[in-house]
Image (spheres, rainbow, N blue to C red):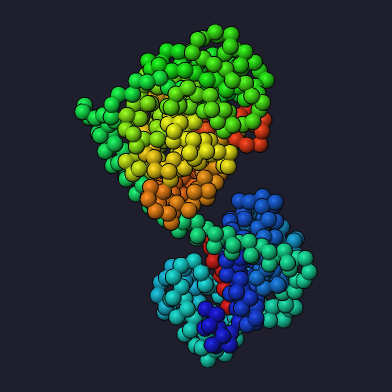
Amino acid sequence: MLDVLKKHDAHAVFFVTGTMASRYPDLVRRMVDEGHEIGLHTFNHPDLSLQSKKRIDWELSQNQLAITGAAGIRTSLFRPPYSSYADAMDNKSWPVTQYIGSRGYLTVVNNTDSEDWKRPGVQEIIRRATPHGGKGAIVLMHDSGGDRSQTVAALDTFLPDLKDKGYEFGNLTEALDAPSAHSPVTGAELWKGKAWIFLVQASENITGVLVVGLAIIGSLVIARFVLMLLLSGFHARRVRRKDFRWGPPVTEPVTVLVPAYNEAKCIENTVNSLMASEHPIEVLVIDDGSTDGTARIVEAMGLPNVRVIRQLNAGKPAALNRGLANARYDIVVMMDGDTVFEPSTVRELVQPFGDARVGAVAGNAKVGNKDSLIGAWQHIEYVMGFNLDRRMYDVLGCMPTIPGAVGAFRRSALEPIGGMSEDTLAEDTDVTMALHRAGWRVVYAENARAWTEAPETVQQLWSQRYRWSYGTMQAIWKHRRSLIEKGPSGRFGRVGLPFVSLFMVVAPFWPRSSTSSSSTASSSARPRRRSWPGWASSPSRRSARRTPSGSTANA
C-alpha cells in the first residue's frame, strides 16, 4: 500500500495498533518518513465501549509507546476499533469518545467505507470508496488483517482516476489546514519506546525458536517413547523366561550399607525390614554426624549382624566410602536411611552377579508415600518412566545411574575407580558412568523392590529435581572424554552419553535424570547441613512404609 501511495504521490492517515507497530517498526517509520500521518488504534484492538477508563488509558499509552519506539513521535489522532460513521455512535461509544477527547486526542471516523475487508472485488471496492456528489471524504481502507491484494489493486486504480477528476489525497491535518498531529519525542521517553520495541521483537523471535525447538524435542520424545516401549517389552520377555538365568545362583552373604543423617524417625523401620531379608547379610549403619540420636536407636536394637559406624558429618559419599572400607563381603548393597526393603529385595538384587561381567545392579525403587497428589504423580513417574527407562538402558547396555535407594556393587569394581566420588551432585550417576568406562556391565533387577519416601511439597520436589538435573550435567561433563575413547568407555560414550544428554537434560520440561543422584527422594529434597548433596534432617517425615487487528488507512 505504501508503494502505491508513493507511486501516485498521495498521503494517508494510518491508524495502527500497538501490537502491529511493535512487530513492524520499520513500516511505521517509513509511513512517517514518506509524509503520512499516524494515529492510534489502541494496542490490542478491544471494543472500548466495554472497557474501564483504566483499561482505555492503558490501551492508549501502550499504543503511543509502540509508535514512539518505532518512529520517535507522539500523535494526537485516534480512531476507535470497530467504529464506522459518525451517526453510528450510540450511548455506549459516545462517552468513550468524550473521555478520549478529554485526554487530548482528536477522534477520527470515516464517512466513506470501501468494505475492502469483505474482498468483494477490485471494482466493487473502487465503487464503494468513491465519494458521492463531488464532495470530499474520509475513505476507510485496510492495510492488514488478511489478504489485501484486492485493496492494493483497487488503490492503484482509484488514486489516478480520482486525481484525474480533481481530487487530492492528503493527511487529515493538511485537509483541515491544522498543525501536524505528530510531535517529536526525545530523551528517556524515546528510549523507553525503543526498549519496548526491542523486547516485543525479542519475545517474538524467542517464541519462534521455542516453537521449532518444541517441535524437534516433541518428535524426539515420541520416537524415544516408541523405542522405550519396544526395548522395555523385549527386556521384560527376556528376563521373565522360565529358563532365564544370570548365571550360578548367588548365595554368599553380602554387606548392606545404610548411610544415615538425622534419620531417627525412619531408621528403625529400615533396619527391621533388612532383618526380614531372605538372603544372608551384614548391615552397616554409617551415622554421618546425626544430631537426633539415629545411631543410639540402632545400637539399642541390639541386633547381632548390625554394626554402627559413627563419623563426623562429611557427606554421603564419604559415609559410603567409610562403609566400603569396613565391609566384610565383596558384594555391597547400598540403600538410604528412609528406604524399606522387601524380604526378597537383597536376594533379587544380587542374582545378576552370577554373571562375572556385571559390576553393578540397579534395583526397582518405588514411592511409598503415594497418598498425596504429588506422591501419586511421582508414583506414576517411577512406574511408567523410571522403570521403563531402566529396561531400555539395560538392553542398550548404557544404564546411566544406580539409584541410591536400592543398588548393589562389586567392591572389587568400585575400588579401582576410587569408590564414591564427591566431584558431582549426582554421585550415583558419576560412579555408574565410571563403571561403564571401566568395562563393567550395569543391569536392572526389576524384582528387587525398595519403597522410598518421595518429596511431599513442591519446594522439596524442585530441590530434588534441580539437584538431579544439575548433578547429571556435571557427570556428563566429567565423563565427556568417553565420546572419543575406544573400547567399553567409547561404547558407553557414543550411546549412553547422547541419550542421557538429550533425554535427561535437554528434553524434559520437568527436570529429571532417572532416579539418579542419591535417588532417595526424601534425603535429596531436604535442607542440607553441608553444601554438597545428600544429607538433611526432615522437618516432616513419615515412617517408612511398604508399600490483533492491523492498521486502517484513511485516504
Q: Quick check: 364 above or below 97?
A: above
**From what the image shows, is residue 430 above or below residue 185?**
above
Outermost residue toward the bottom in this view: 164
For the point 52% across and 78% down, the residue is 1
In percent of the image, x 34 and y 20: which residue is there? Answer: 251
Residue 281 visible in rendering: yes
* Residue 285 on image: x %, y %: 55, 20
Is 205 on the left-hand or right-hand side of 366?
right
Q: Residue at horizontal 49%, vertical 40%?
A: 417
Count all numbered tags in the image, as a single digit. 0
* Residue at the (65%, 73%) spot, across then down: 38
Q: In this view, does 211 lie above or below 37?
A: above
User: Which residue is more in the foreground, 523 or 139?
Assistant: 523
Quarter of the rendering containing residue 75: bottom right
Residue 119: x and y in percent read: 42, 70
Q: Residue 546 location in percent, x, y?
A: 44, 18
Residue 374 visible? The answer is: no
Image spot of residue 463 (x, y percent):
59, 36
Judge by depth and name the residue closer to the eye, 301 or 540.
Answer: 301
Q: In which quarter of the image is residue 72?
A: bottom right
Position above or below: 53 against 251: below
Q: Which residue lies furthest to the left in this view?
A: 243
Q: Nearer the viewer, residue 412 or 402?
A: 412
Quarter that holds the C terminus: bottom right
The quadrant holding residue 24 is bottom right
